[in-house]
Image: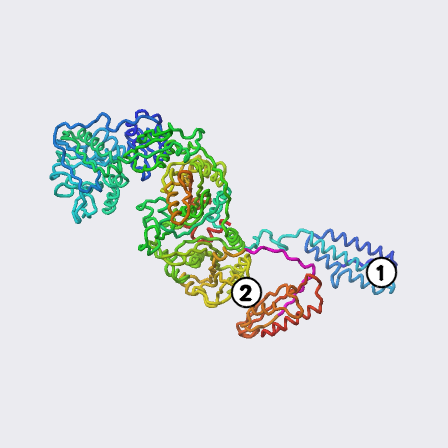
Amino acid sequence: MSAAIPELKQFDEAELDRVFAELEAEVSAQARALTSDEAMEAFRLEWLGRKQGRLGQLSAAWLKSAPVEAKKLLGVRFNKLKAQIEEARASTAATEARPVGAGLDVTLPGSAQRVGSEHPLVKTMAEIVSVFQRMGYSVGLGPEVETDFYNFEALNFPPNHPARDTQDTLVVAGQEGKPLRERLLMRTHTSPVQIRSMLEQAPPLRLVIPGKVHRNDAADATHSPVFHQVEGLCVDTNITFSDLKGTLDFAMKAFFGSAVKTRFFPSFFPFTEPSADVQISCIFCGGKGCRKCKHSGWIELLGCGMVDPAVFESVNQRRVEMGREPVYDTKKISGFAFGMGVDRIAMMKYGISDIGLLYSGDMRFLEQFA
Amino acid sequence: MNILTKWLRSYLPELPVDDRQLAEDLTLRGIAVEGEFDAACGGRLYEMDITTNRVDAMNHYGVAREAAAIYNVALKPLDAGAAVMETKPGEGFPVRIEAKDLCGRFTARVIRGVTVGASSGLIAEYFAALGQKQISAPVDVTNFGWMAMGQPTHVFDLDKIVGGIVVRRARAGEKLMLLDGTEKTLAAEDLVVADEEKALGLAGVMGGWDSRVTEGTKNILVEAAWFDQAAIRASSRRHGLHTDASHRFERGADFNAAPIGNNLVTRLVVEQSGGEVVGPLVDVVVPEIAAKTAERKAISLKVSEVRRHLGATVDGLGVGEDVVARYLSALGCEMTQTGVGEYAVKLPSWRLDLEREIDLIEEVARVYGYNRFADTLPSFAGAVVELPHVEQEATIRETLRALGFTEAVSSTFVSAEEAEEFGGGGVAIGNPLSAEAGMLRPSLAPGMATMLALNLHRDVSSVRLFEMGTVFGGSTIEVKERVGLALGATGGAVATALYKAEDALFYEVKGAIEALLAKFVGAVTFEVGELPAWIAEGRGARVLLAGEAVGVFGELSAAELQARKLRQPCVIASMDGQRLFEAVLRQPVSRELSRFQAVERDFSFVFPDAVTWAVIDAALHGVGAGLERDELRSVRPVEIFRDAKGKAVAAGSYSMLLRVVFQSNERTLTEEEIARWTEWVVAELTGLGGTQRV
């Protein structure tokens, strides 16, 4: 591998420049051909190798025999050549593409720390709330343990209404000694927050009320004793049924996309009159009919209605008992309320088949929403 | 409830739409057609879903009335051309109502000389199409009656009745064999139709066996009555009998329908089974009940109120006075104009659900069609008010997710044992779904333990979860709600030079808590203190923010792990979310960055176990040797080593590699300064009982 030592005729600068220029040209030529680790190693050994390296041999041959005055000239040139060799090695190592096996396997998965996921219910609820916030609704909250008064009486449920039965409502133990209206129960809907808000605030009122609710339902794929609702309430002078229609149509378009249509059906709720069920055109098939909408083209999503005057009257009565003005004058004030099940919407949106998964804490399920 | 369109059309000769359109129009007006099938008798069979407040529409004539209102077409009178005349003079049959509070009306009619056979004609045709079982002509006629117009009726074998009819409360313990062959022991609250000697039938629910019409029956008494809805509901529940009759009575029957129903049934019995109608229709009325039902006071209605509540219509005209008057009249209201756009409205006897002006407004909207109202948006002058804790809540969620914790939502309920172990006391549910869900959760920790266990049992070995939700304290007298926050972690923690494998999970959760609380104003500190029993001894800590307790965390105790059949350590933090909601978020402040080089110095020391990190940290932060507080940039542990065998490091002590960083904002530090401070650090650490390793 070692090349012959070039002949050096004399130790003057011109002769030295000529010989070193040849060596530099040789290094440059070799450096351009460095395409593999093997070539690189050969290059290093040829020039810098401790025993066979040409740089060592040249300096041994020339420096020893050089006159004292030429040693410095030689040293400067050796250093320059060595620097050139080092630079060729460094720049080649940095720029040349290297084969797999010698470097990184870029196809290996990265090692990023995992990020936690949003809960589909929390996310869906926040999205619904945000739609109504943009329409001027403030968020209202209320307790999950309610009294019969807020959950039923003030909402115009008659005393013998089936919803009041313990088959439907989970009740707190040991309430028998209390008057009916003070008995504690797990709220069955977010509607009591309507009453609480109207007791605290005078109209105009625009509230969106998210929350957890409970019913005495045995768990199956579509029922859970624990579920979530978002409720809305809008009260002012001259609020009409057409305002209710327009508001919900707008909100559904904002939430599901502008192509979604709504239609309203008569329904019955004790605390609204007129009452309606709202269907949206199927978000999966666009209304053509598919398995998801049972081939009807429509999906039932909301309950709503105009606030029943009896609700305003019970609010007024309670306000008076609390030493407040009965400001919900049914001659001037009207309003609408609406409510929807968050679980059902989330299940529909994400294709979740079993409501129980939402409350399981199963990482395999939850991590899908990251 | 099933409806035959052929039957329906017999009342609506001018109906302008086909069966498909009719189904859609009815459905959009709340008389919901859930299913549609071809009917054997011709036309379609509708499967109806009628809300419980609309008992008046649970029959063919009621649905026909709705259609007549929708399409503005004529509705034939129910007993058109069949005025029932007595064919043979006679005395009225004796009827006495004793329970005047529960029976408001009782009609009775005698038919003599019938020949009981199978029913024929329309009845047989319709029954076949509806899949309704045929029994005998007189009984089929009574079923035809309620399906036609909603009034339940009953036929007695007249010869089994002793004396006359008495409507009374049952005598406690009185026995009655019913039509279904079961013998019931009656309660004093039950209402019975009796004769002078015995109960004949359970009023409004089911007739009796002994007085039933059989093939041998010659003479018949036809009953059509009005019974109190609450009494019938109670009887029906008490005896576990839900019948077509009780279904209608317990939802509020039409007070004026009894004589009409009786006439209809009488006419059809004679048509089907022959015989003669003897004597007049006996019609006993209790005026007090009539006043509360059929003779209710007229209510006033203003067209302006209709418009105020309903708003704009698609055609831009709004709901006009003519529309209001026409729809309400078609539904049976008697409209008397009392002023400009004002009416006194007498309510139909079959619509007990209508009581107030708003009920009439709803009827107008319903029949007009909800979808013919415009979509408008109300103007609003108010402002959107944010909840006070909205930023705190969002910060908690974002931070924990960024730290790798996934949000979970769990049940509100725990078992009594869990409530006891994770909080004590607690609020019990009176009618829990199961013993496992008997209490309101006092903390989110038990739910978190359940979720960690669920994952481990499903071979998910590395879990990071958090939950934020309501927790319950107080008592069943007064329940107190707070926001709780829990973190749960198991598996997947990585050992480092500082943390041994078995401790790494604890320190990871501690780090998450530190990162979370760093978002809030106030020093974050940890102390051992008193910990709940669910935390393993020596493996947990109390968490303080600005000196105030905000939670506890630690490894689940061996007992808790065992109870859940877990073999892998689990760390749970139970935090006071409410306190964090009320805490002040830290406002970031930018500090000057030094232009001068930082100098790192490592120190290797052996300390007795009693010298904790807090002691070391505190000692060095008490700066000395001319070192300015801000020139001591950081002090942190890099490596900890313990030797179980006590060889490399003596038992009861540990070795620590500690890294100190010095830096100034004003100048390059001198060798001399650094040497002085290094000496000072060594002196401080030695002063704590440490021995420098060389």
Q: Position of residue B308 (x, y in %)?
A: 42, 34
Q: Position of residue A191 (x, y in %)?
A: 40, 46
Nearer the viewer's eye, disc 1 or disc 2?
A: 2
Pick the residue in front: A32 or B549: B549
The verdict on residue B600 being magenta is yes
Pick the residue in front: A126 or A203: A203
Q: Is residue B393 left or right of residue B633?
A: left
Q: Which quadrant is the N terminus of chain A positioned in?
A: bottom right
Residue at x 32% of width, y 48% of height: A165
Determine the main secondary structure of the stretch shown in magenta: loop
The answer to whether residue A115 is seen in the rendering is no
Query: What's the distance in space between the residues labelled 1 and 2, CA to CA?
Result: 60 Å
Residue B348 occupies quadrant: top left
* Number of numbered discs overlaid on the protein picture: 2
Secondary element at image label 1: helix
Q: Is residue B26 left or right of residue B295?
A: right
Q: Is residue B592 left or right of residue B184?
A: right
Where does label 2 land, which residue? Answer: B499
Residues flagged by tags 1 and 2 on a common chain:
no
The amino acid type, in three-letter code, at marker 2 is Tyr
Subunit of mark 1?
A: A
Q: Position of residue B622 (x, y in %)?
A: 61, 69
Magenta part of the protein: which range? B585-603
Where does label 1 land, which residue? Answer: A73
